[in-house]
Amino acid sequence: MNLQKRKQHARKQRHRRVRAKIFGTAERPRLCVFRSNRFIELQLINDEKGHTLAASRSPLKDARNGGAIIAQKAKEKHLARAVFDRGGYAYHGHVKEAVEGAREKGLVI
């Protein structure tokens, strides 16, 4: 197995461990993060029904703004709190910037 596949496999295993402990509800949805090479995507998910309540996508260099957008969409849907799902990524760099952007706009995580 090459290095890239090993890293991806390790991230997926970490994500499974995190998801085993985290569950989003209608009152407190799960804030899920996905990071690609170019973009960071954030979703608010109600796991009880399996519905995505809100989503945002922004370039990696503007990750903090992506968090602000998801927080604004949460406010429009009268959601003030969320459970953070880091998606197997380290809480560092772009992931941290996106979550801090959401916190700055008033989303309690």
Image (cartoon, helix red, strand yellow):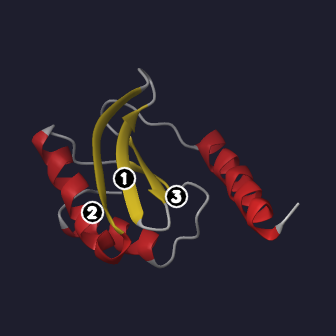
Badge 3: residue crowd in 10 Å (few <14, some 14–19, many ≥20): many
Residue at horizontal 15%, vertical 53%? Answer: 72
Check disc 3 and report the residue beneath it. 86
Q: Amino acid at mark 1?
A: Leu
Q: Nearer the viewer, residue 58 or 51?
A: 58
Q: Please state the horizontal and vertical placement of residue 14, each as a whole percent of the image.
A: 70, 55
Check disc 2 and report the residue beneath it. 66
Q: Is residue 89 left or right of residue 97?
A: right
Q: Please state the horizontal and vertical placement of residue 16, each as a whole percent of the image.
A: 68, 45
Q: Please state the horizontal and vertical placement of residue 90, each as a whole percent of the image.
A: 58, 70
> Under tag 1, what secondary structure?
strand
Q: Is residue 53 above or below residue 58?
A: above
The reply to whether the C-beta atoms of the residues labelled 1 and 2 are less than 8 Å apart is yes
Q: In terms of sequence position, does the residue under pointer 1 or pointer 2 come before the other?
A: 1
Check disc 1 and report the residue beneath it. 42
Residue at horizontal 65%, vertical 40%? Answer: 20
Q: Is residue 91 left or right of residue 16?
A: left
